[in-house]
Structures are given as C-alpha cells and as structure tokens.
Image: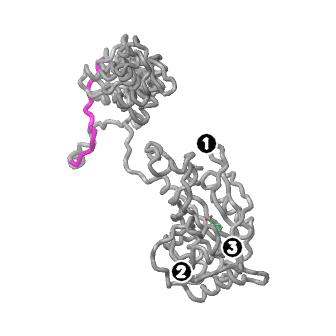
Amino acid sequence: MRLPERQLAVLEAASATDERTIGDLAAETGLKPETVTGAAFELRDEGLLEVTETTHERAELTDEGARYVDEGLPERRLYRAGRELGAANTPVSMGEVISAADLDGPAVDIALSNFARKGLGSIDAGELTVVPDADPSDDPEMAALEALEAGETLTADDVVDRLDSRGLVQIVESVTRAVTLTDAGVDALMTGVETAETVAELTPELLASGDWRDVEFASYDVEADAPPATGGRKHVLRRTADRVKDVLVGMGFQEMAGPHADSDFWINDCLFMPQDHPARTHWDRFALDVDPTEDIPETLLSRVERAHREGWGDDGDGYHSPWSADFAREIALRGHTTSLSMRYLSGHAGAPLDPPQRYFSVEKVYRNDTLDPTHLLEFFQIEGWVMAEDLSVRDLMGTFEEFYRQFGITDIRFKPHYNPYTEPSFELFGDHPETGEEIEIGNSGIFREEVTGPLGVDCDVMAWGLALERLAMLTTGADDIRDLHGTLADIEFLRTAEVSY
Ligand code: PHE
C-alpha cells in the first residue's frame, strides 16, 4: 500500500489499543494539528483509522470578568469601603460608601444586589451595614475568576453557572478528536506501507515539463472543518433591494429615478394632498432651507391648483381650502417616492406615456417619525404603478400576491384604508415569522381622477408603496428594524443573514 507521507506518519503514531488525541499525534509527528486532523479523516475514509469526537464545555473570562480580576468584584469593593467607614458598628449612608468604593454606573446595582446575596451586610433606609466577620477574601466567585485568569480549566459547576449568569464568564464548547487503528489499519502497517509523493499545487514547471502526468495529487477534503472566513459581503438590505429589482424587472417593470430633495408640488400637491394636511406640517416633513424651485411646468401647476380648489371630473368638488403656488415650490426631503410616480406619469421625467406601462423604484424616503422597532427616520420604499385600461382591485391584489410569493410570503392580507390620492385604498399586512405578529408591509390603491386628470392620464393607474425593511424583517426573521442596520445590528447576523430566492 502507498500513502502520502503525512498519512503514513499519523498511521504509524496511532495505536490499536489506546485512543490518541490529535494533540498527541501532532506532538509525536511534528506535524501541525490541522494537518494531522486532515490526515486522520483521510485515513478514516480509507477504513484505516477510527476517529472519535468528544465535546467539552469550559468557562472563559469575559471582558467584564477579566476587569474584576484586576479591580475586585464590585460587591467586595463595597464591603471593604463600608468596613473602612465603620459600617460594622454604625450604619453609613449608602452614597458615602458607594463613592468611597469608587463605584458608578451599572457597577452600583451589581454591587448592591450581590452584596445582599452574599450576606456581606444589609441595606436599610438608604444606609448600609456590613457584617463584621464576613471574610471577603474567601469568595468562591473571585477564586474562580482568578483561576481562569491563571489559565486553569474550569467546567460548569454552581460557581461557574453563577458567574455565567452574571456575564463574567462564558461557556465555550470545544471538540477533542482522538484516533485508534482499525484492524485494516493494523494489517496495513504489518504488510508495510510506502510513502507516495503527493503534490499539493500544480505549478507552471509541472505543466511545462509534462511531469504532471506522473505525479499523485493530494486530494482536498471539502468537508473538513475550516475556520470561518468573513470576507466583505453586500449588506442584507442592499441584497434584498437587488432581489426586489430583479423580481420587478422580471414582472415587466422599468425603473424610475429622481431627486431625494424635491418640491412639495411633486411630493404632495400632485397627489391631491391638501396643503393643510397634517403630514405637510413642519413636524412631519424635513423642509430644506433652500430657494424654492421655479422648475415646475406652468400648465400642470394650474391644473393641479384647479383640482385642489374646484375638483376634477363631473362630480369633483375639490377642497375649497387655501392653496398657494409658493408652498408648492418649496423643497423638502421626500416622505415617499410617489413623487417619482408623479414625475413619470406627468410625462415630465421623459416622453408622455401610452398605456400599458409598468414602473417601479426602490429608493430612500425620509420621515420625521419616532424611532421604534418598526420605524426609522429614513427607509427604503418599493414604489410601483401600473397604467392600463380597466384595472380593478383584483389586479392590484394579484400583483402583490405574485410579488411576495417570490420571497416565500404567501399569506399577505389586505385591509381597506384611506389615502387622499387613491380610491379604493388598501393597506397590506404580513405575519412576522418569529413573533407571529401582524405587521404592516405596504399601502396601495387606485389613483383618483383628481390625481390622474391634471397629469393628463386618462386611463386607470394602480399604485403602491411597500416598505423594503419590513420585507427584509419577514424574510430574515429580524424582529426589530434596528437589527437590520445601525449601531444595534448584530455583526454575526449581518455576516450570515440570507436573502430568499
Ligand atoms: N405613498 C404611500 C405611502 O407612502 C404609498 C402609496 C403609493 C399608496 C401609491 C398608494 C399609491 O404610504
């Protein structure tokens, strides 16, 4: 039998009667442990070795635990300071002891709760008394922390569990592998094994000389353990956005582009949003301190004004509320990307459009909301519209069902809603895969005549704005939008989160 050198070395170092660990074999053969592991698995696959794996748990100091080894546990510092201030005889004000112990921030609570738990003294009406004969140096928790710092191995027991729940140690798992020779392995060694030269890398010289024909190549074990490689990777939200674009292009949509800072005209007036609507006040919108724009098509401006003042269509009535062209010319960050839909539907973004047409964008919008698990001040909207003769609510629902199905979401629900610019209007809801909570994922409807009329569109337009972050929450299982990006996002999640295809 012929075996590569490293396999032969491991085979010869293994025993039929005693388990030998990878560490033992590495020491004996002078090979690196990962080389020994690789060779051991190859020999196992040949039937020459048996490999057993044992999982161990052991405690490791956390940063906080390591800090207390230097500074002392907060409760012990509190005890010492109390004692020095005479709290063994007369109670001393807690504030005084805390500052003498030089404790602040969360360390104060930690000190107080463990102080009482360990029976180092008591606290009553803001004053602290210490037990005179408690020996604070006889503390198993501190002893365990010191042992770990000194490199000792500790496994789970009551003390370690307590330290774990205090966050001072963490329990890590490690696997030890050991090998024994199989009967076939013993036979092979008895009959004699020769070394086979193996080549790990194909070089230009091997190719040029033609020697590659005669050499034996080392085989790769693609299932062997390897350290995880965390290279650069596209952010999960960007990947979801890319996926959304692919899906919509696949459904026959074209992409819209346009300004983040836009005039109120495109953001609101075209949408038949009354100028005194609450969403248009300075609380909700990010107004920009720049000159108002002159760049609004005059005919369109007066048609939109007419819709607001008098209405549009046979039974239109308008708002009869104040309307000023100056307000329409002011600039703000867009609160939705429906501004882009208005630019495109009006023909202002390019040529006038003949039905049927389908357009979308996946772009950022800005709202002065309060941050919470489902709201950010900036987020991405999946905007879209379809222009065609005779559209119905069924077309709208069918489009969403098809769209969300591409992401594995098959249980969306619709609820009647109100928008100043659509009639009928629907909100969309989905179920969060982890929490089961119903979350709003979008808003939609069929544009009113007061919107399409002034734009010069004389067929139906169904439209929507969906939240990209909410879609990503449903597909990744993140239950707080702030887990997706920002300071709270978990790096491990960002490294491993998958986008469904
Ligand atoms: N602009 C709406 C929003 O931001 C979404 C929407 C767009 C609704 C188009 C209907 C039609 O919630």
User: Which element is circle 2 on?
Assistant: loop
Asked whether mark 3 and ligand 1 are closer than 8 Å, the reply comes as yes
Separation (CA) of disc 1 from disc 3: 35 Å
Q: Residue at x 74, y 68 (%)?
A: 424
Q: Residues within 10 Å of mark 3 (few under 14, many from 20)?
A: many
* Color scheme of the displayed model: one colour
Q: Is residue 269 above or below residue 76?
A: below
Look at the image and tell me whether residue 501 can be seen. Answer: no
Residue position for label 1: 434
Q: Is residue 180 above or below residue 385?
A: above
Residue position for label 3: 447
Residue 339: horizontal and vertical position, in percent?
57, 73
Contact flag, marks 1 and 2 (Cβ < 8 Å) = no
Type of amino acid at the residue the image marks with label 2? Arg
Quarter holding residue 84: top left
User: Which element is circle 3 on?
Assistant: strand
Residue position for label 2: 329
Asked whether mark 1 and ligand 1 are closer than 8 Å, the reply comes as no
Magenta highlight on residue 282: no
Separation (CA) of disc 1 from disc 2: 45 Å
Read off the magenta span: 191-204
The residue positioned farthest toward the front in the image shown: 90
Type of amino acid at the residue the image marks with label 1? Glu
Separation (CA) of disc 3 from disc 2: 23 Å
Residue 198: horizontal and vertical position, in percent?
27, 34
The one nearer the camera, 313 or 460, is: 313
Quarter holding residue 464: bottom right
The one nearer the camera, 439 or 352, is: 439
